[in-house]
Amino acid sequence: MAPARPPALDVRCPPLILIGMHRSGTTMVASMLAELGLFLGASLDANHESYFFMQLNRWMLATAGARWDSPGNFGYVAGDPALRLLTARYLALSLDAPRVARYLGRPLYRRWRTPRALPNPWGWKDPRTTFTLPVWLDLFPEARLVHVYRHGVDVASSLRAAQGPRAEAIAASAARFERRRPLYRFRPMRSGFALWPRAGTLEGCFSLWEEYMARARAHAAALGERAIEVCFETFLAAPERELERVARFAGLPAEEGRMAEVARRARPDRALAYRRDAELLAFAASVDERLARFDYRAAPAAG
């Protein structure tokens, strides 16, 4: 007999979870929603991601030998009832443990002790949740989902650029290795060379985008009215309208003046930026049929 599924946690306000491929505009949407009142955590990184939830998502992926750039193996955890139950139990314990103060901050922790007790809209943003979501939904079956997506070639280009020039990154890692070579005779390396092999090429980054897109689209379809999808390019073309749509879905105040003020930070020039680069245009043409699977096509060069 299959192990029992973990009971849903009691919550005053179900969380709002933002997912999507890295470099897809999730930070832009999350930061704007935070300005409108969505609580995403007291301790956030530069991408508006909660360290508390990132740590839990990284741990979950690691249980399957996966990580953000090779996430597929987590499906084996999600598909194993016994392991999934244990994983959910650990998450439930973490949400009620003192370390959740890193998410809540001291004032909210002293008052509520757990995010489950928060009376106002709260949640988190972490692209890794695109894969770990099934376990989170075991605990929060009424959670709402925001999926932010962007043209795959722009995502691939941005992700590759985030690592810096490949040759320079490898040279820096090699130099660090030489400096520490004597130390490694007695103390093994704790991790790799701070390089992400799959993110080093356009093809690798693009295939990762496909993987995230397929999984996120499946989640959105399964959740129906409890999910909303946000196209990055559409958002930049009409930021105030799109922000109001997402804010209402999130249960946030949609005051016209405030909405316009926050939406003004959107940068329309970031949409379809690949069209201004010959290398990216050629790559887009080579993956046109793969783009079409997600309702994108290669576009002509910008005039």
Image (spheres, rainbow, N blue to C red):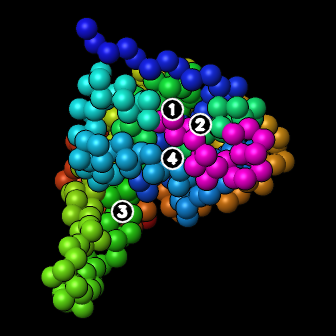
Residues 198 and 302: in front is: 198
Q: CA distance from mark 3 to mark 1?
A: 33 Å
Q: Are marks 1 and 2 in contact (CB under 8 Å)?
A: yes
**Vertical comparison of 91 with 174: above or below:** above
Q: Which secondary structure dominates the residues rendered in magenta?
A: helix
Give the residue displayed 43% in from the left and 56% down from the top.
Answer: 23
Tell me the mark number nearer the camera, choosing from 3 and 1: 1
| Amino acid type for the residue under numbered disc 1 | Ala
Residue 4 position in % (x across, y down): 37, 14
Alpha-carbon span between mark 1 and mark 2: 7 Å
Three-letter amino acid code at the position of disc 3: Leu
Q: Which label is found at residue 92?
A: 1
Q: In this orientation, which residue lies closer to the viewer: 187 or 225?
A: 187
Q: CA distance from mark 2 to mark 3?
A: 35 Å
Q: Which residue is mark 3?
A: 159
The residue where tag 2 is placed is 96
In terms of sequence position, does the residue under pointer 2 or pointer 3 come before the other? 2
In the rendered view, does 68 fall on the left or right side of 129?
left
Which segment is the magenta one? 91-113
Query: Does residue 13 lie above or below 273 as drawn?
Result: above
Residue 262 visible in rendering: yes
Name the N-terminal-most of marks 4 and 1.
4
Earlier along the polypeptide chain: callout 3 or callout 1?
Answer: 1
Q: Name the image quarter holding the N terminus.
A: top left
Which is more N-terminal, label 2 or label 4?
A: 4
Q: At which x and y percent is residue 192?
A: 23, 68
Residue 175 sits in quarter: bottom left
**For the residues marked 4 and 3, what is the alpha-carbon distance in whole angstroms?**
22 Å
Judge depth for marks 4 and 3 and give the one in front: 4
Disc 4 target residue: 53
Picture coordinates of residue 144, whole percent (x, y): 57, 29
Q: Amino acid at mark 4?
A: Phe
